[in-house]
Image (cartoon, helix red, strand yellow):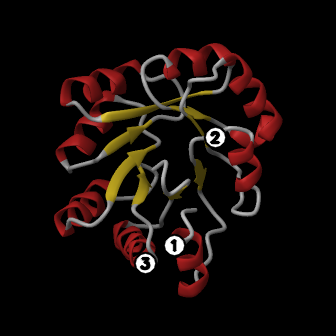
Amino acid sequence: MAAQRLLPVLRSPGADAAVDRTRQLLNAGCRVVELTTSTPDWDRALAGLVAEGRGLIGVGTLSTGEQATRAVAAGAAFLVTPFPAPQVREVATAAGVTLVEGGYTPGEIAEAAGRGPAKVFPAHVGGPRFLSSLRAVLPEAVLIPTGGISVDEAPAYLEAGAWAVGIGSGLPDEPAALARLFTAGG
């Protein structure tokens, strides 16, 4: 994820669309993709993609232990929450799967960052300056801002100290443009 710098966060209308878009991203040189539980049949999409053995596929928008258990069973490489989620944390710890736990307040982010990578959500509300302020008090934290960030805005977050940036919409559909994003390291 750190090498890629951009983390596609897919909210698809169905499992087949999620699989197609993930394959398109992988073919363009992307190595890490986050599917979301807002996609119907997300666990079926995840299991199929994991079986193909290409890239690291994780699941985000997890808020319950039951969702986390399903994600682990389907082969998720990592789990992502939008806010502090103790039940998801328990499942991730028991399964030995990386958790990117979300938060927005400095306290929530500091607590999550004390355990591993922390998702700053919704990042667009505070913008790069908020992230820069967090970095000032959490210099060693692995911070991944997500939520309302366009591809064009991602460099400002990276300059402010983001380890990677989650992009949920606005990724180009054109294969060559998509490839440029991922072959340049994000």
Q: Which disc number belongs to residue 162?
A: 2
Q: Write the residue at 26% across / 65% down.
A: 49
**Res. 129 image quadrant:** top right
Sequence-wise, the earlier of marks 1 and 3 is: 3
Q: Residue at x 57, y 69 (%)?
A: 184
Between the C-alphas of marks 1 and 3, the distance is 14 Å
Q: Hey, what amino acid is under mark 1? A: Thr
Please state the horizontal and vertical placement of residue 1, each as a whole percent of the image.
45, 50
Q: Would you say 152 lies left or right of 13 here?
A: right
How much space separates mark 2 and mark 3, taking CA atoms?
25 Å
The three-letter amino acid code for the residue at tag 3 is: Gln
Q: Residues within 10 Å of mark 2 (few under 14, many from 20)?
A: many
Return the mark for residue 183.
1
**Mark 1 neighbour density, 10 Å: few (under 14) some (14–19) many (20 or more):** few
Q: Position of residue 172 (x, y in %)?
A: 62, 76
Q: Does 124 sit above or below residue 18?
A: above
Reading the image, the residue beneath label 3 is 24
> Does the CB distance between marks 1 and 3 fall below 8 Å?
no
Q: Position of residue 16 (x, y in %)?
A: 35, 73
The structure residue drawn at horizontal position 47% and vertical position 34%, both measured from the top left corner, is 81
Report, in whole angstroms, how far the alpha carbon at label 2 lies from the one at label 1: 19 Å
Q: Residues within 10 Å of mark 3 (few under 14, many from 20)?
A: some
Q: Is residue 34 left or right of residue 155?
A: left
In the image, residue 3 sits, relative to residue 152, either above or below, namely: above
Callouts 2 and 1 close, C-beta under 8 Å: no
Q: What is the number of the mark on residue 102?
A: none
Give the amino acid at mark 2.
Ala
